[in-house]
């Protein structure tokens, strides 16, 4: 009996909380990549948002970030590997880009049903 406990106890201790699911990882990365969080400009779910409004030559202008939860993976990947006006460059790995895409599309299947 004692031997069994020796085997099981570490399994219980180490299996709890020290691992995060791929979606938890993706969510953390979206909020805090190496640099400013994507959501600061693109909105919490990538729905896009107005970052600032300002006046230029007596005209009201807006600076906004587009929705990024509606584009396909290929486009998403391409954009993150080039320079974009008004957006910081991140130099993300392929795995990180996939995780971010997962975060933005986590509810897609639920919506379809
Ligand atoms: C400082 C604000 C800011 C932050 C932070 C930011 N972006 Fe952007 N992003 C923009 C702006 C502005 C554009 C539009 C660029 C353009 O018009 O060329 C853009 C464009 C994009 C596009 C292209 C959308 C399209 O339809 O063409 C994608 C994809 C994207 N961002 C993803 C991300 C991801 C992922 C992150 C986090 C790792 C991020 N952005 C962080 C401001 C930001």
Image (cartoon, helix red, strand yellow):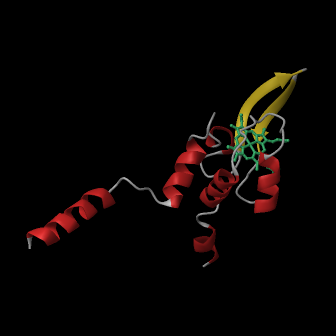
Image coordinates for residue 17, horizontal then vertical, percent: 34, 55
Task: State the residue in front, 5 or 79.
Answer: 5
Task: State the residue in front, 1 or 88.
Answer: 1
Give the residue drawn at x 63%, y 68%. 108
Give the residue drawn at x 24%, y 60%. 10
Quarter of the image for residue 75 reads bottom right
Task: State the residue in front, 91 or 59.
Answer: 91
Q: Is residue 81 left or right of residue 30?
A: right
Give the residue drawn at x 16%, y 72%. 4
Question: Where 42 sits versus 13, above or below?
Answer: above
Question: Where 22 sits versus 58, above or below?
Answer: below
Q: In terms of image quarters, where does ligand 1 lie?
A: top right
- Furthest residue toward right: 57
Q: Quadrant of the C terminus?
A: bottom right
Q: Is residue 59 left or right of residue 9?
A: right
Image coordinates for residue 3, horizontal then vertical, percent: 13, 69
Give the residue drawn at x 62%, y 56%. 99
Image coordinates for residue 38, horizontal then vertical, percent: 65, 42
């Amino acid at each position: 009996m004692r031997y069994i406990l020796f085997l099981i106890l570490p399994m219980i201790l180490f299996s709890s909380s020290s691992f995060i699911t791929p979606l938890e990882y993706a969510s953390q990365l979206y909020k805090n990549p190496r640099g400013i969080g994507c959501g600061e400009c693109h909105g919490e779910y990538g729905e896009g948002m107005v970052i600032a409004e300002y006046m230029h030559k007596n005209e009201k202008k807006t600076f906004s970030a587009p929705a990024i939860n509606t584009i396909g993976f290929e486009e998403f990947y391409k954009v993150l590997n080039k320079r974009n006006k008004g957006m910081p460059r991140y130099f993300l790995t392929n795995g990180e880009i996939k995780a971010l895409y997962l975060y933005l599309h986590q509810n897609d299947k639920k919506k379809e049903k």
